[in-house]
Image (cartoon, coloured by chain):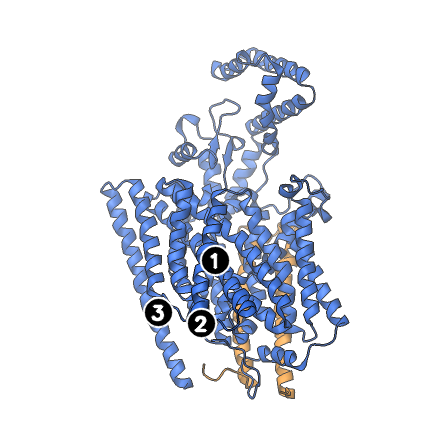
Chain colours: A blue, B orange
Amino acid sequence: MAATTVGANRAFFNQLRKYYTWYTGGFLVFLVVLAIAEQLGLSRQYIGYAFLFATIALYAGIGIMSRTADVAEYYVAGRRVPALFNGMATGADWMSAASFIGMAGTLYLSGYDGLSFVMGWTGGYCLVAFLLAPYLRKFGQFTIPDFLGARYGGNIVRSIGIVAAIICSFVYVVAQIYGVGLITSRFTGLAFEIGVFVGLGGILVCSMLGGMRAVTWTQVAQYIILIIAYLTPVIWLGVRHTGVPIPQIAYGQTMIKLAEVEKKIFADPREADVRKIYSERVAAANAAQKDTVKAHADRRVQLEKEVADLRTANAPQARIEPLQRLLTEYPTDPEVWKAAVTKDRALAARAAPPRPHAQPYPGKDEAARDTARLNFLGIVFCMMFGTAALPHILMRYYTTPSVQQARDSVFWSLFFIFLLYFTAPCLAVLAKYDVYTNLVGSSFAALPAWAAQWSLVDPTLLNITDINRDGIVQLAEIVIGGDLIVLATPEIAGLPYVVSGLVAAGGLAAALSTADGLLLTISNALSHDLYYKMIDPSASTKLRVTLSKVLLVVVAVLAATVTSLKPGDILFLVGAAFSLAASAFFPPLVTGVFWKRATKWGAITGMIVGLGVCIYYMMRTYPFFTNMGVPVMPLWFGLNPISAGVFGLPAGLLTIIIVSLLTPEPDRQTQELVEHVRYPHLRGDPVSTVAT
Amino acid sequence: MQLTAKHQEYWRRNLRLTAVLLAIWFVVTYVMAWYARPLAEINFFGWPLSFYMAAQGSLIIYVVLIYVYAKRMRKLDLEFNVEEGDE
């Protein structure tokens, strides 16, 4: 029997390789055809539509071909996904809209300090590989609450697992659907809400019909699109700057040049001028809050003096005139003036001097720098342990044919993720160099084409205003929204619009694939863990799968509805999901495998304490909650609320250890289960856990 | 079932490998980041060393660590006869 299984697996692998090679070839042909059509005059809007509908139709097609009603196929893709392909699927499952579109922008804006996400979201896979994936695969059931339920016994642990899995996945899925809406509306001109539901249709056709099986094969297809989309413009831009087609290994030289340009720009007196104007406006806005009448009069005197100074200095009329106009239109009513300047308080951030890209932990004094370092480490910690605890990722390692393949598969997962994550910092540096050399210092009358266009399309992404009215663009006069970097790279690199469409398709693939995995996690937690394991263990397999499909639609529509309300800070939500997952799941999963003495009550109290501490810290420190009336608390050690897992995880782990030692040792059967998962194949093992 | 001494030895070897790899992981991640400011003074092919490590070096080391783990564990399984038949 064994030999035939190996043969079948090998044949299946070869078949998959053939399919996906043809698929990749087909996609490249599609790109070339569209590129030719563009040269022949196909409009941008139609190129946008072609990408949107062709890729969604493709994913739906794969979903329909993979439809299934078999339980093992539906929940774990029949456990025959080869390591390499599971790696690609995990890569797509993992990389969300935030990674694809947001990451390079975050790095552009925060330089070294943004790299905490790059490290956290890759280093977490070491924990997955060494501490979890092989053991979960040996355990071999369907969900993460399954493992907690079997290892610690009883429904309480399982229930907490279900609740925690749903909280972190739902928060995360809302962020993904938001990304889908944003991309479709930007590239096709459809309304945001319609974009949300178009994308939702794509997600549903795929995951509802075929569950994990369909999701797996679509995710492989989505990975191929997203990595082509990410690398193409960067390579192009890289060749221009470094002369090497692998800019990731050559941008060290660009960094040297960037540091020189930074030095020159930061020392430019005109930059200081612009920042001084911001500080004055902030000061006026703050003064207006205290004594409106006096501030109103003071500001007028200040402006008059500036005009007089300019005239004495014989400045060109073009510089005096706008100031003069400001003075003529100066509101006579102090209250009107106050209303107009209050928003200027937001300029405080722009009045601060810029920071060199490569400098770690900048700050005004030693204490501020140490706090910045602590927050960097806090984010790395939460992202890493959150990675190793998010159910939709761990679930993927149930789908490989063997324990060894699960180990190999983590390697492939990180390898495929690495391809994107080591490109993002490179893209940020190349784009920054381009902005600093081509945009900064250019004349407002002749902005680079891409800048002129984007500032027209969307002022939240790019806004350039001549603050000091010298007709030249200063760095301090540019406001860049993080998402711009990836979206505008094709134009910065001077590529045809087809590549912009490709980037949109890549972002869409990233958002859809992650949403697929998350929705599946939620509906499985409800249908498998809650209904089948706790409410009706005699339910037929057909009923279970059908129920799961129905729930998937319900949850998806619910998530889309929440998304269309545009809830606040999406980035915080994503970070919160990681902190929550790390606090709730990581301690009981790891002690479950590595410490036989861990008991049921240890796990129950540990999960509650971990989640509790994490939620408590967020509630007391995050403005969203404190503005709703939750009493504010000073930050512990200056750590931001996004890193609440730094407190939640150790608290949970400590509780598990203490309570376990106070309660009786787990019974022989539980200990045998632990031994069972520790060995890939224990000859003569009485325990069997693999569910089919 | 009663685990044999050989089984116990397998688990000890596994723990040792895991501990060594995690120690490397810890140094690369947290110790390097803790000393990022002094390390930024060192030039590494154009990059400040701390920037290079956070943007690329540590990522490469993570990939290699996981590769080494998968390879060593395959060997260990065979040596202690706990490998999965031919599944």
**Crowding at mark 1 (Cα within 10 Å: few <14, some 14-19, many 20+):** many
Q: Are the two marked residues, 2 and 1, in contact with CB atoms closer than 8 angstroms?
A: no
Q: Nearer the viewer, residue A107 or A578?
A: A578
Q: Amino acid at mark 3?
A: Leu
> Which mark, residue A349?
none
- Confirm whether residue A618 shows in the render: yes
> Gap in Å between the C-alphas at discs 2 and 3?
28 Å
Residue A267 image point, x, y percent: 58, 32
Residue A353 image point, x, y percent: 61, 34
Number of labelled discs? Answer: 3
Disc 3: which residue: A16
**Crowding at mark 2 (Cα within 10 Å: few <14, some 14-19, many 20+):** some
Q: Residue at 56% across / 52% down in the picture? A: A117
User: Could you tell me which chain the residue with mark 3 belongs to?
Assistant: A
SS assignment at label 1: helix
User: Counting residues from the N terminus, which is met first, the one under dot 2 or under dot 1?
Assistant: 1
Residue lying farthest to the left in this orientation = A40
Residue A367 to residue A2: above or below? above
Residue A158 to residue A329: above or below? below
Residue A195 to residue A541: above or below? above
> Which mark, residue A541?
2
SS assignment at label 2: helix
Q: Amino acid at mark 1?
A: Leu
User: Counting residues from the N terminus, which is met first, the one under dot 2 or under dot 3?
Assistant: 3
